[in-house]
Image (tube, coloured by chain):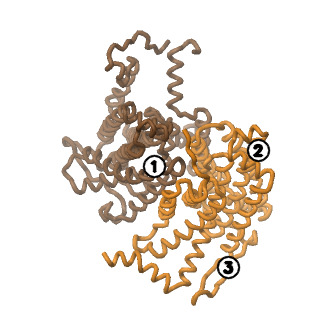
Chain colours: A orange, B brown
């Protein structure tokens, strides 16, 4: 018994103390995967904020955009042109989603729209495999001039290995969040988006076009999906296995709150770091693989104290 | 005028509260039950029974369970697969501990284990609502899936990490295991499903069901009229998980014959949720219609190219069926967001007033 308590409460911290470079390495890896979770969560938040739709298809949009990019390149399109074409594809997708799914289903209960995005998920999985084949593909990092290789930084009496691509991902993610924050807070479109998020009816009454706004947010989510797809694809292969990471974004989402962009980022980092630390130091106790549910449990614990997430809008219920 | 209930007077409270107050409904149900219990075993082929009827019945039961939670109480759950798994593994452990007990008793008992686990994971439901709760139930799903793989005790330290169903007999007839005939298994599944559906139908129209619906419609208001929210929500989780657990146990023992953790993963949860939504939230009939549609659709889609004589590769057909399935889900939601059960109601109404439009 004491042995067990020791290995739960003392031993992991002793390990952390004796090998600070390993701790730093784990923290860095957690940070990077957290940033990538946050990118997916960001796509969710954008759409949820503006249309109240819980977009389950965000994960598959990531895979679909990455597949389109790589697939186009395989057919001889130069990398940057392929990237531009992928952006166009996401724009077309945004228009199609608005026209075919959102417009007929306007004013339906949330769960119906949620289910509709499920339908979209199946549709995109099938379509992606039909066009580009189901085999895993390699992301065209070289053609896109993404940095490869890694730095070894001496730190705390040891070395910390940092992949250049991870650093690039972190930088790009930060830039994207900053750009989105500016867009939301400083531009006309951003104001319209926030108005729609507050109330569809009120926004309509002051002359904001809901259809236009929906296309914009779905397109923005599509662009975020492309960036996420490139980053994830560069770390592993581009295949539908990436779909699983979309499920990882959900605890990030509830942790940060469905409606908060900074929440998505901070939630992502908490989940990413918590997951890696948990797996590395406490994982061996339980048998490996606790990564699959640890994130949810972390999120659940936070939720019990703040039911609307860390940064979500306060839920006020009235009769 | 094809369907008329004029002249059927109710003269007692008993008649007023009957499950099927209208004569036509009683006849209809009797015919369906007769067909299911007598007609199908006599006529259907083993293939039909094994790959269509048993799965649809089992999945209907799971969908009924989820419908009690999501459709009647308004608590969105994505942990159905996990709860089904609890039922299946509980049943397997029970058969190893009590090898001489009647298998049907064990299947029903395993539901109680699922109910207990479901109640535990229902605990956050008082504070967390809506999609937040849905994601919280995902914690249950992933944690349980992980347990099914990692806790070797659950599958008796089997090397293949899967459950092998032992052969059990009832009145000298093999009921489970490889030697059991499809018809026997079908009849047992049908009996259990019919019994539990009857229970559910009575549950939702009684006091408990009404408190559930009150909570679904507005939980604050429900609390103000004296419904104890916590107990009501936890009861919904328990009953729902009981149904899912029994469905899971039947899935392994009477349908698949063996199972591993893969059978109870997140996709299973989503599938059941589809059935509930496409069938109709808050309708028991909807659970059955949804299960039949979602299970039947891929079979039809896979068979369709061969039927029309198109020589499409099976991989392509599989992918195309995904595209069509996704498009059909969206189509169904747009045409009738309240599900197939509502379509059925509309159809019934049309038949009643036929040939007049209203």
Residue at the (51%, 73%) spot, across then down: A277
For the question of whether residue A12 can be seen, the reply is yes
Q: Which residue is mark 3?
A: A149
Q: Is residue B282 above or below residue B83?
A: above
Q: Residue A312, image x and y in percent?
A: 60, 55
Q: Residue at x 59, y 37 (%)?
A: B333
Q: Residues within 10 Å of mark 3 (few under 14, many from 20)?
A: few
| Residue at disc 3, secondary structure | loop
- Give the secondary structure at mark 2: helix
Of marks 3 and 2, which one's residue comes earlier in the chain?
Answer: 3
Q: Which mark is residue A59?
A: none
Q: Residue at x 60, y 68 (%)?
A: A33
Task: State the separation of the CA atoms marked 3 and 2.
Answer: 42 Å
B156 left or right of B52 in image: left
Q: Which mark is residue A212?
A: 2
Q: For residue A26, what is the image quadrant? A: bottom right
Residue B272 drawn at (x, y percent): 47, 45
Say few, some or many: other residues with alpha carbon within 10 Å of mark 1 (under 14 / 14 to 19 / 20 or more). some
Residue B62 x, y percent position in the rendering: 41, 43
Q: Judge if badges 2 and 1 mark residues of a common chain.
A: no
Closer to viewer: mark 3 or mark 2: 2
Instruction: Identify the subunit bearing mark 3.
Output: A
- The residue that disc 1 covers is B126
Residue A114 vs B352, above or below: the answer is below
Location of the C terminus of chain A by quadrant is top right
Protein chain holding label 1: B
Q: Is residue B225 left or right of residue B91?
A: right
């Amino acid at each position: 018994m004491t042995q067990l308590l020791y290995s739960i409460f003392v031993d992991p911290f002793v390990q952390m103390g004796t090998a600070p470079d390993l701790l730093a390495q784990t923290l860095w890896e957690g940070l990077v995967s957290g940033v990538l979770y946050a990118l997916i969560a960001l796509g969710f938040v954008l759409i949820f904020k503006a249309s109240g739709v819980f977009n389950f298809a965000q994960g598959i949009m990531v895979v679909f955009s990455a597949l389109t990019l790589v697939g186009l390149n395989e057919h001889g399109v130069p990398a940057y042109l392929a990237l531009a074409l992928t952006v166009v594809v996401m724009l077309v997708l945004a228009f199609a989603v608005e026209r075919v799914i959102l417009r007929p289903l306007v004013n339906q209960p949330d769960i119906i729209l949620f289910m509709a995005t499920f339908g979209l998920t199946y549709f995109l999985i099938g379509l992606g495999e039909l066009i580009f084949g189901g085999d895993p593909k390699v992301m065209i990092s070289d053609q896109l001039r993404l940095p490869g290789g890694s730095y070894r930084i001496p730190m705390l009496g040891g070395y910390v290995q940092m992949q250049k691509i991870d650093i690039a991902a972190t930088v790009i993610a930060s830039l994207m969040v900053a750009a989105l924050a500016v867009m939301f807070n400083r531009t006309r479109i951003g104001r319209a988006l926030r108005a729609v998020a507050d109330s569809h009816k009120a926004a309509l009454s002051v002359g904001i076009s809901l259809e236009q706004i929906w296309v914009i947010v779905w397109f923005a989510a599509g662009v975020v999906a492309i960036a996420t797809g490139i980053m994830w694809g560069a770390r592993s292969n581009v295949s539908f296995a990436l779909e699983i990471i979309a499920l990882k974004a959900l605890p990030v989402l509830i942790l940060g709150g469905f409606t908060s962009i900074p929440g998505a980022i901070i939630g992502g980092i908490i989940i990413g770091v918590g997951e890696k630390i948990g797996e590395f130091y406490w994982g061996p106790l339980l048998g490996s693989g606790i990564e699959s549910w640890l994130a949810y449990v972390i999120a659940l614990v936070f939720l019990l104290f703040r039911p609307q997430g860390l940064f979500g809008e306060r839920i006020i219920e009235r009769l | 005028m094809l369907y008329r209930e004029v002249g059927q007077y109710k003269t007692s409270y008993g008649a007023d509260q009957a499950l099927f107050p209208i004569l036509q409904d009683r006849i209809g149900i009797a015919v369906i039950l007769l067909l299911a219990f007598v007609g199908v075993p006599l006529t259907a082929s083993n293939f039909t029974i094994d790959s269509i009827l048993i799965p649809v019945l089992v999945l209907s039961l799971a969908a009924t369970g989820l419908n009690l939670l999501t459709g009647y109480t308004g608590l969105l759950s994505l942990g159905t697969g996990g709860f089904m798994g609890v039922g299946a593994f509980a049943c397997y452990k029970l058969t190893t501990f009590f090898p001489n007990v009647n298998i049907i008793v064990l299947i029903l008992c395993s539901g109680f284990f699922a109910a207990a686990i479901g109640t535990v994971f229902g605990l956050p439901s008082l504070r967390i609502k809506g999609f937040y709760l849905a994601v919280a139930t995902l914690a249950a799903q992933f944690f349980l899936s992980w347990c099914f793989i990692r806790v070797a005790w659950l599958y008796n330290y089997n090397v293949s990490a899967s459950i092998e169903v032992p052969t059990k007999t009832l009145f000298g007839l093999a009921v489970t295991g490889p030697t059991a005939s499809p018809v026997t298994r079908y009849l047992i599944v049908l009996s259990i499903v019919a019994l539990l559906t009857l229970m559910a139908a009575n549950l939702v129209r009684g006091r408990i069901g009404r408190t559930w619906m009150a909570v679904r419609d507005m939980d604050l208001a429900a609390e103000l009229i004296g419904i104890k929210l916590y107990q009501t929500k936890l009861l919904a989780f328990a009953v729902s998980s009981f149904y899912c657990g029994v469905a899971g146990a039947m899935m392994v023992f009477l349908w698949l014959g063996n199972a591993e953790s893969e059978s109870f993963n997140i996709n299973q949860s989503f599938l059941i949720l589809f059935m509930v939504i496409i069938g109709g939230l808050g309708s028991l009939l909807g659970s059955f219609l949804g299960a039949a549609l979602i299970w039947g659709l891929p079979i039809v889609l896979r068979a369709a190219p061969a039927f029309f004589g198109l020589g499409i590769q099976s991989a392509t057909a599989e992918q195309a069926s995904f595209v069509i399935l996704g498009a059909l889900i969206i189509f169904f939601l747009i045409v009738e967001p309240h599900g197939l059960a509502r379509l059925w109601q509309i159809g019934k109404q049309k038949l009643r007033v036929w040939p007049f439009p209203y």
